Image (cartoon, rainbow, N blue to C red):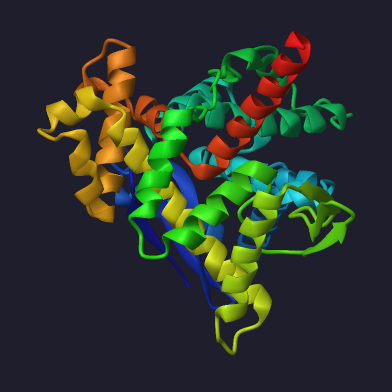
């Protein structure tokens, strides 16, 4: 029933219980203790039925005791504790918190929280940067991790997680953010965007869509919603915003004309799909078109970069969409390296990620355009 074997540096006894295999370590090194002497230990433990039953009973009880301790310790693993932490969060932010804590769980291989060290977090911080995440993104991840640690510490009545106090006291080094000023549209850049959209087959619709969004401040996904009522000499547009709240805006005659162009287009689309689905498809298409126009404008206005790739500004008009996307990314890296007096090839992953955040999107430009418009209005009022 039991047999003697070499495992590693020691003699082990193998036996079977309830059709399962188990091993007992004898603490006898096989290079020191001979097989004959090791057999004496086997005989002491399994020399008779009574000895065998007693040995198996004691060994199985020891295994169960270890399993019980291991199960209680598993409750202190990061994954288990983070799950409890997420259950107490609002459903709207739970997904973002879960995504941030997943980095901690995967990198530390789901450690016991009491074994976590400041060095683990430092290595995680550098790993995220090397993976191409920006310092701002990494700081937002560590903000969630800090909230998780604070929650554990405030509920640690038995002082099991004494290491968290030291970790939290050094947490400021992980919350370093870099100010990211959004680019704003100049009058020349707006004109360039319109020029690029004008070359498209559906230019009337594209230009009306862009001007309506910029003029009203509505998101691209909101421009196709709602209805317009006339109130004396004014047009009032009422629609449902992305947050579910209802809004109303007073439109100028030009904006009303633009809105009619948008509605006429939606009504002219003959499809069996519901109106909501048609709006989503149109919005997604416009988002891509405007993003492409933004990137063409970015290239057109960076003549030094174009010279380096043997191009002239006028050549941007004839570029394919794939070429525009590829060159705009190269242009951002070129601009970042030049601004920081660095060699482009020597840029770290996180620096490249920061450079990519400068890529123009119509949504960010729309926000800064509105801010500029409000600022110009205030300036005119003050001057008056």
Q: Is 106 displayed left or right of 59 in the figure?
A: left
- Looking at the rendering, which quadrant does residue 131 occupy? top left
Q: Residue at x 30, y 39 (%)?
A: 328
x and y percentages locating residue 358 in the rendered image: 43, 31
Q: Is 313 displayed left or right of 372 in the figure?
A: left
Q: Is 186 displayed left or right of 163 in the figure?
A: left
Callout count: 0
Q: Nearer the viewer, residue 94 or 40?
A: 94
The answer to whether residue 309 is above or below residue 252 is: above
x and y percentages locating residue 211 in the rendered image: 57, 47
Q: Quadrant of the C terminus?
A: top right
Q: Can residue 229 be spotted in the picture?
A: yes
The answer to whether residue 110 is above or below residue 143 is: below
Q: Residue at x 20, y 50 (%)?
A: 318
Q: Nearer the viewer, residue 14 or 86?
A: 86
Q: Nearer the viewer, residue 375 or 181?
A: 375
x and y percentages locating residue 79 in the rendered image: 65, 47
Q: Residue at x 65, y 64 (%)?
A: 260
Q: Residue at x 70, y 12 (%)?
A: 169
Q: Nearer the viewer, residue 374 or 361?
A: 374
The answer to whether residue 344 is above or below residue 265 is: above
x and y percentages locating residue 327 in the rendered image: 24, 40
> Looking at this rendering, what residue extends furthest in the bottom direction?
272
Q: Can residue 23 be spotted in the picture?
A: no
- Looking at the rendering, which quadrant does residue 159 occupy? top right
> Looking at this rendering, what residue extends furthest in the left direction?
310
> Looking at this rendering, what residue extends furthest in the front direction?
233
């Amino acid at each position: 029933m039991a047999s003697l074997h070499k495992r590693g540096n020691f003699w082990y006894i193998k036996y079977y219980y309830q059709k399962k295999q188990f091993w007992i370590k004898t603490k006898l090194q096989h290079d020191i203790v001979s097989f004959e002497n090791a057999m004496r230990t086997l005989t002491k433990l399994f020399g008779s039925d009574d000895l065998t039953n007693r040995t198996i009973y004691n060994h199985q009880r020891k295994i169960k005791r270890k399993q019980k301790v291991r199960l209680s310790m598993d409750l202190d693993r990061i994954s288990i504790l983070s799950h409890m932490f997420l259950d107490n969060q609002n459903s709207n932010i739970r997904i973002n918190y879960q995504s941030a804590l997943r980095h901690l769980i995967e990198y530390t291989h789901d450690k016991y929280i009491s074994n976590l060290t400041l060095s683990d977090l430092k290595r995680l911080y550098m790993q995220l940067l090397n993976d191409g995440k920006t310092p701002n993104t990494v700081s937002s991840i560590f903000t969630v991790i800090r909230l998780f640690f604070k929650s554990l510490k405030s509920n640690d009545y038995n002082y099991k997680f004494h290491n968290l106090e030291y970790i939290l006291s050094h947490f400021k080094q992980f919350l370093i953010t870099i100010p990211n000023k959004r680019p704003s549209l100049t009058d020349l850049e707006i004109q360039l965007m319109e020029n690029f959209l004008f070359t498209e087959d559906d230019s009337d619709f594209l230009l009306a869509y862009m001007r309506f969004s910029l003029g009203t401040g509505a998101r691209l996904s909101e421009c196709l919603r709602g209805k317009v009522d006339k109130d004396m000499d004014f047009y009032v547009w009422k629609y449902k915003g992305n947050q579910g709240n209802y809004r109303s805006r007073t439109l100028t005659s030009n904006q009303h004309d633009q809105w009619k162009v948008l509605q006429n287009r939606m009504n002219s689309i003959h499809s069996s799909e519901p109106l909501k689905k048609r709006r989503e498809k149109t919005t997604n298409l416009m988002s891509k078109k405007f993003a492409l126009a933004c990137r063409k404008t970015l290239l057109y206005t960076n003549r030094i970069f174009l010279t380096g790739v043997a191009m002239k500004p006028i050549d941007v008009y004839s570029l394919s969409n794939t070429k525009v996307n590829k060159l705009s990314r190269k242009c951002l890296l070129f601009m970042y390296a030049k601004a920081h007096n660095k060699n482009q090839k020597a840029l770290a992953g996180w620096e490249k990620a920061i450079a990519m955040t400068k890529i123009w999107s119509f949504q960010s430009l729309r926000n800064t355009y509105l801010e500029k418009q409000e600022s110009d209005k205030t300036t005119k009022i003050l001057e008056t």
